[in-house]
């Protein structure tokens, strides 16, 4: 897995790590059972504090996306083929989506603009998921 981070971005590094791992899983680059680099290895690769990586992994663990074992390290727990969402996911997702939609509304997006944009983004997953 190749991660690209922008160390000069306003987006916190732990958030970028989390987002890139989620994207890699969504695109099929990472699958259920695949190991992730250790927090120390990833931190060393980017020259960042290992606690930053740990925070990203903790968020992914709380979301049920990865599992962390002292012996085997961090491993992908869910991918698009794992099955239906876990209980509580939809409520949390709806809450986050409301904020994203509110941001779009404030910026003047119309319903049509939003639907078109979502289709463009979904097309990026074509061939990855049924």
Image (tube, helix red, strand yellow):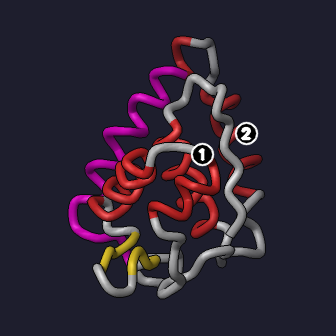
Where is the N terminus found, in terms of image quarters? bottom right
Main secondary structure found in the magenta portion? helix
Q: Which one is in front, 92 or 37?
A: 37
Q: In which quarter of the image is residue 130?
A: bottom right
Location of residue 73 in the rendering, given as x and y in whole percent from the top left corner: 39, 78
- Compared with 44, 80 (above or below) is below
In the rendered image, residue 110, in percent from the top left (x then y), is placed at: 63, 22
Q: Where residue 39 is drawn, which disc sits there?
A: none
Is 76 on the left or on the right of 107, as rendered?
A: left
Give the camera-side residue of 53 and 96.
Answer: 53
Judge depth for marks 1 and 2 and give the one in front: 1
Q: Residue at x 43, y 39 (%)?
A: 97
Residue drawn at point x = 68 percent, y = 74 percent: 29
| Image vertical order of residue 23 relative to residue 33, above or below | above
Q: Is residue 45 magenta?
A: no
Q: In the picture provided, is 103 more to the left or to the right than 83?
A: right
Q: Please, is residue 86 above or below residue 58 in the view?
A: below
Badge 2: residue crowd in 10 Å (few <14, some 14–19, many ≥20): few
Seen in the picture, residue 115 relative to 9 is either above or below; the reply is: below
Q: Which residues, given as a range, are shown in magenta?
A: 84-103
The residue at the point 58 percent across, 69 percent down is 25
The residue singled out by tag 1 in the image is 47
Point 60% across, 45% down: residue:
47
Disc 2 target residue:
116
- Would you call the spot at circle 1 few (<14 residues within 10 Å), some (14-19), or many (20 or more)? few
Where residue 99 sits in the image (x, y, percent)?
Answer: 40, 28
91 or 38: nearer the eye? Answer: 38
């Amino acid at each position: 897995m190749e991660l690209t981070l922008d160390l000069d971005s306003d987006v916190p590094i732990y958030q970028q790590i989390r987002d890139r791992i989620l994207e890699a899983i969504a695109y099929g680059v990472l699958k259920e059972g695949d190991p992730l680099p250790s927090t120390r290895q990833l931190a060393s690769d980017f020259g960042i504090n290992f606690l930053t990586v740990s925070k990203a992994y903790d968020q992914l663990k709380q979301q049920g996306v990865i599992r962390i074992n002292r012996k085997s390290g961090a491993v992908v727990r869910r991918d698009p083929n794992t099955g239906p969402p876990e209980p509580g996911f939809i409520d949390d997702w709806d809450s986050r989506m409301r904020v994203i939609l509110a941001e779009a509304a404030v910026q003047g997006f119309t319903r049509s603009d939003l639907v078109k944009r979502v289709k463009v983004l979904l097309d990026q997953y074509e061939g990855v998921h049924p």
